[in-house]
């Protein structure tokens, strides 16, 4: 991971500047006003997708940025969450809440199971094992045609209406309604993630990232903490998967493929893994670049790849990480109190 | 002061974000935009470029002739990445942002079914390139039409030839997804119907994009069939044929390839093509020898210096059929064009195509021939071409079209 010279700085940044009150209010206001600003159904959809991808990237960052575990299998939660939502709402009971809970719960279980094996390893071995697990799940989804539809995927995943039965209900078929629904869910979950990240528990994770041996000496159960981080990341990823499933209305095993995992890692690095909202920013960047570049050429990955190379060379802290560092240097010493607050 | 700077920074960031999000396109008046999903990258990319060329040529012809009802055609060609999620996303962008009149493609069967559901929801005509039969059976809707041949048309025609040759013992191989399953199902059911004595000791279902077919070929040889029916498509077919050749399959059995008559496949295989074996193509540059086909091939070669393949021919015809439906409707109106689509007839390079109102499928003949070396062309072509009429090749419409009028 990062060299130890930047340790102190990066820990501070995790809870640092963009998460100050003004920044968060501005971001929320922007998110709430977005449908009115873009004025086009397509861009409302793009914003919805960015929100879901943000949640996914932030969930992965619990492992990469906070605990220092590079997972190459995070797409497994996107996929399993998506399939869980689809199977439940299509075959059993068409309820948005039940679907989302199924998505989160199935991923929590899966993450617990995978985590028991994975967290005992570190570095490359951890990365390889997460990759292997996710490919196993991919293969199952691919060949279990009767349940998952195989390579053809599952179609017609509903957007069940929400509300209190008998009292009122809100249809989510309209792009704007659905956008606000996703916004509320994603904002709530990201807030929860932020609370966890800044709790004493979150501090321990960061300590594990910096020096697991020392944490062990202090007497804290490192493996158990890593396992908890793994489950939290998986569960949040599962919720993103459930939302993605109902958003697209269509899913296929591609969601589980390792290239999808790579894309989530890319979002995280692009935005900045030592910044809480960095991965979300990276998700937005990636989807926006893809959308723009695809209009005039099909090789959008070259552009993203080029940006990534430049980034690693010149802005190793990611784009948002860089701006946060820049902003905190502008306001000299202004943020030093932030991380002591929680 | 520092607080002010921080606020200024965020204000700047917000303005930048809003500016980036509200990038909008200007709409030129009097154009009919057609959105095209073409497999420019991925497994099917060998045909992606020709698809685009076929589209561009048709668009140019229509515009050179003065457009349709005073409107010029404009094609927005985008990559489908041979991937359902990307195809759906791009389809949405073409419909919602670019406001296309009709959506063409994609080629991947699963992606096509996903896209047609989306275009149905967003009320835009969709002409998938994919041949899977489910498009005009259970997933058909008012908005789904297909000008190109369906899998049943070519595969049932294949069964007719197979029956004529009296081949009894079969092995089949096809990719494990909707189109691949569809091709083999249609072939096998129709052959069994005509010849109840036919048997199939082995059916292989490799995954789409498989690289190593040796295990399947081994099992195939152990089953000792008289003939094999190959439903693989795109790069998969080329990989399989090369491997089958190295196992000596070309000499041991009769090979029927559903997609193998396509020009780009024959050109890619070159000297390694299975000469003397049967193959089909939904469009052929050397047959029929008609004025329409000659003009199409000559113009295509003049424009791009290559021969048109199956996808080029089908893409070209699709654009012309859309233009014809607008002329018949007498108005540039999405819904009216759909009302006028049933019964549209177009004298395409491959012969007359008539849009059947009941199942939204273009009625057309199917072609099978023997892969041969040619003196006229520097690549293999089909010869001894057998034309199977749509009456024999297509399903009766009570079996299809259940969903089309919804």
Image (cartoon, coloured by chain):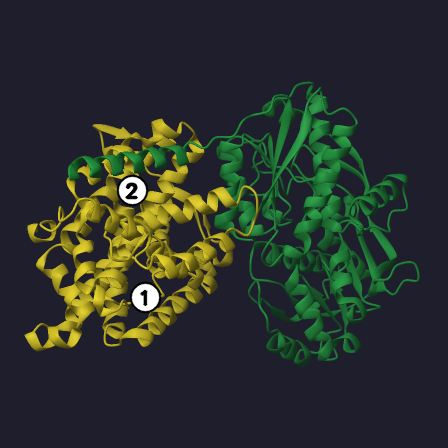
Chain colours: A yellow, B green
Packing grade of label 1 (10 A; few <14, some 14-19, many >=20) is many
Task: Give the camera-side residue of B242 and B357.
Answer: B242
Q: Residue B379 lies in what quarter of the image?
A: bottom right
Q: Residue at x 26, y 30 (%)?
A: A169
Task: Give percent across and percent down for residue B226.
Answer: 76, 73
Q: Quadrant of the N terminus of chain A?
A: bottom left
Residue A52 or residue A305, whichever sits in front = A305
Q: CA distance from mark 2 to mark 1?
A: 29 Å
Give the image location of residue B101, x and y in percent.
60, 29
Earlier residue among tags 2 and 1: 1
Residue beneath the point at 64% across and 43% down = B399
Q: Position of residue A6 (x, y in %)?
A: 22, 64
Q: Report whether B322 appears left or right of A277.
A: right
Q: Is residue B342 visible?
A: no
Horizontal side of residue A102 vs B344, given as left or right: left
Residue B350 position, x and y percent, is 81, 44
Front-lying residue, A75 or B403: A75
Q: The residue tagged with tag 1: helix, strand or loop?
A: loop
Circle 2 packing at 10 Å, graded few (<14), some (14-19), many (20+), is: many
- Between marks 2 and 1 in the image, the one whose residue lies nearer the viewer: 1
Chain letter for mark 2, please: A
Nearer to the camera, B39 or A138: B39
Name the residue tied to disc 2.
A96
Q: Which mark is residue B246?
A: none
Residue B302 vertical position relative to residue A172 in the rendered view, above or below: below
Can you tell which quarter of the image residue A167 is in?
A: top left
Outermost right residue: B375
Residue that carries the numbered disc 1 in the rendered image:
A71
Q: Is residue B91 above or below residue B124?
A: below
Residue A26 appearing in the image:
yes
């Amino acid at each position: 991971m990062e060299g130890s010279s930047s340790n102190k700085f990066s820990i501070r940044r995790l809870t640092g500047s963009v998460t100050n009150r003004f920044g968060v209010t501005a971001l929320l206001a922007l998110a709430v006003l977005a449908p009115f600003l873009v004025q086009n159904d397509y861009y409302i959809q793009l914003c919805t997708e960015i929100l879901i991808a943000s949640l996914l990237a932030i969930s992965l960052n619990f492992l990469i940025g906070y605990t220092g575990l590079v997972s190459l299998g995070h797409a497994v939660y996107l996929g399993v969450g998506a399939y869980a939502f689809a199977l439940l709402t299509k075959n059993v009971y068409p309820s948005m809440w039940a679907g989302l809970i199924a998505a989160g719960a199935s991923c929590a279980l899966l993450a617990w199971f995978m985590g028991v094996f994975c967290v005992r390893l570190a570095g490359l071995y951890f990365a390889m094992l997460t990759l292997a697990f996710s490919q196993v799940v991919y293969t199952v989804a691919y060949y279990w045609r009767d349940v998952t539809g195989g390579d053809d995927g599952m179609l017609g995943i509903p957007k069940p209406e929400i509300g209190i039965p008998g009292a009122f209900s809100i249809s989510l078929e309209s792009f704007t309604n659905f956008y606000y629904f996703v916004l509320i869910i994603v904002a709530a979950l990201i807030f929860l993630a932020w609370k966890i990240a800044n709790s004493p528990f979150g501090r321990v994770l960061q300590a594990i990232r910096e020096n697991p041996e020392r944490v062990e000496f202090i007497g804290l159960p490192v493996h158990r903490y890593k396992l908890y981080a793994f489950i939290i990341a998986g569960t949040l990823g599962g919720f993103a998967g459930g939302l993605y499933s109902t958003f697209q209305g269509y899913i296929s095993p591609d969601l589980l493929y390792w290239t999808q995992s790579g894309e989530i890692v890319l979002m995280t690095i692009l935005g900045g893994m030592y910044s809480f909202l960095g991965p979300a920013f990276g998700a937005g960047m990636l989807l926006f670049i893809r959308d723009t570049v695809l209009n005039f050429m099909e090789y959008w990955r070259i552009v993203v790849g080029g940006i990534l190379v430049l980034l690693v060379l010149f802005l190793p802290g990611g784009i948002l990480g860089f701006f946060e560092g820049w902003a905190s240097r502008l306001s000299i010493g202004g943020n030093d109190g932030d991380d002591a607050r929680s | 002061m520092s607080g002010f700077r921080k606020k200024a920074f965020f204000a700047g960031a917000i303005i930048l974000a809003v500016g980036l999000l509200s990038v909008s396109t200007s709409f030129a008046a009097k154009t009919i935009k057609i959105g095209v999903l073409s497999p420019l990258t991925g497994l099917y990319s060998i045909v992606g470029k020709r698809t685009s060329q076929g589209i561009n040529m048709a668009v140019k012809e229509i515009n050179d002739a003065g457009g349709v009802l005073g409107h010029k055609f404009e094609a927005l060609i985008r990559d489908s990445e041979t991937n359902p999620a990307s195809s759906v996303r791009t389809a949405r962008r073409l419909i919602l942002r670019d406001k296309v009149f009709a959506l063409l493609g994609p080629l991947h069967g699963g992606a096509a079914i996903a896209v047609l559901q989306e275009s149905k929801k967003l009320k835009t005509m969709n002409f998938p390139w994919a041949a899977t039969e489910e498009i005009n059976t259970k997933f058909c809707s008012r908005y789904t039409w297909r000008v190109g041949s369906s899998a049943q048309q070519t595969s049932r025609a294949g069964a007719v030839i197979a029956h004529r040759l009296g081949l009894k013992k079969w092995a089949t191989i096809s990719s494990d997804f909707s189109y691949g399953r569809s091709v083999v199902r249609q072939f096998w059911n129709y052959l069994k119907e005509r010849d109840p004595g036919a048997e199939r000791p082995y059916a292989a279902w490799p995954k789409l994009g498989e690289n190593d077919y040796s295990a399947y070929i081994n099992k195939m040889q152990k089953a000792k069939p008289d003939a094999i029916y190959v439903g693989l498509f795109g790069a998969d077919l080329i990989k399989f044929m090369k491997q089958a050749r190295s196992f000596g399959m070309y000499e041991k059995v009769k090979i029927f390839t559903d997609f193998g008559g396509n020009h780009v496949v024959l050109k890619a295989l070159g000297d390694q093509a299975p000469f003397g074996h049967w193959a089909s193509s939904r469009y052929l540059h050397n047959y029929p020898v008609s004025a329409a086909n000659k003009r199409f091939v000559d113009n295509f070669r003049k424009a791009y210096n290559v021969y048109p393949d199956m996808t080029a021919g089908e893409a070209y015809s699709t654009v012309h059929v859309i233009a014809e439906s607008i002329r018949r409707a007498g108005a540039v109106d999405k819904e009216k064009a759909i009302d006028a689509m049933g019964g549209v007839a177009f004298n395409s390079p491959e012969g007359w195509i008539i849009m059947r109102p009941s199942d939204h499928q273009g009625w057309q003949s199917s072609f099978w021939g023997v892969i041969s070396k040619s003196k006229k062309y520097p690549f293999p072509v089909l010869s001894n071409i057998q034309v199977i009429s749509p009456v024999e090749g297509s399903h009766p419409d009570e079996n299809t079209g259940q969903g089309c009028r919804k």
